[in-house]
């Protein structure tokens, strides 16, 4: 499944537990999640912002860490 750059309305309802846009906005603010409203009142929440606030690892952070072995330079010949 391809995730969009913004949360879906279903995701926002599941996160907040609320249906009304104004109540959702208040709950998101309490959680430290910023949102905007579109012309019909629906909330727009950046997926990246949501993941950052909630401490979810982003795809970029999931890459394995590479460590260089520089012991070679410590060896005396």
Image (cartoon, grey):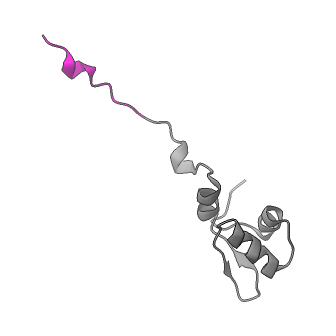
Residue at 64% of width from left, 62% of height from top?
50
Quadrant (top left, top right, bottom left, bottom right) of the C terminus:
top left
> In the rendered view, would you say 48 is above or below 63?
below
Residue projecting furthest to the top: 77
Magenta-colored segment: predominant secondary structure: loop
**Image quadrant where residue 9 sits:** bottom right
> In the rendered view, would you say 53 is above or below 67?
below
**Image quadrant where residue 23 sits:** bottom right
Residue at 75% of width from left, 67% of height from top?
8
Residue 30 point in image, percent of width and height: 71, 69
Residue interval drawn in magenta: 66-77
Residue at 20% of width from left, 19% of height from top?
74
Which residue is more in the foreground, 15 or 10?
Answer: 15
Residue at 23% of width from left, 19% of height from top?
72
Q: Is residue 66 left or right of residue 38?
A: left
Q: Is residue 49 left or right of residue 41?
A: left
Residue projecting furthest to the front: 30
Residue 16 point in image, percent of width and height: 80, 66
Residue projecting furthest to the bottom: 39
Q: Is residue 76 found inside the magenta-colored segment of the image?
A: yes
Q: Is residue 44 left or right of residue 48?
A: right
Which residue is more in the foreground, 68 or 54?
Answer: 54
Q: How many marks?
A: 0
> In the rendered view, would you say 35 is above or below 11?
below
């Amino acid at each position: 499944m391809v995730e969009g750059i913004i949360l879906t309305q279903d995701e926002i309802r599941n996160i907040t537990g609320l249906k009304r846009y104004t109540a959702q906005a208040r709950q998101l603010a309490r959680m430290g999640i910023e949102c905007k409203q579109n012309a019909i009142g629906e909330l727009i929440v950046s997926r990246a912002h949501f993941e950052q606030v909630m401490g979810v690892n982003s795809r970029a952070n999931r890459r394995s860490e590479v460590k260089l072995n520089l012991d070679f330079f410590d060896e005396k010949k």
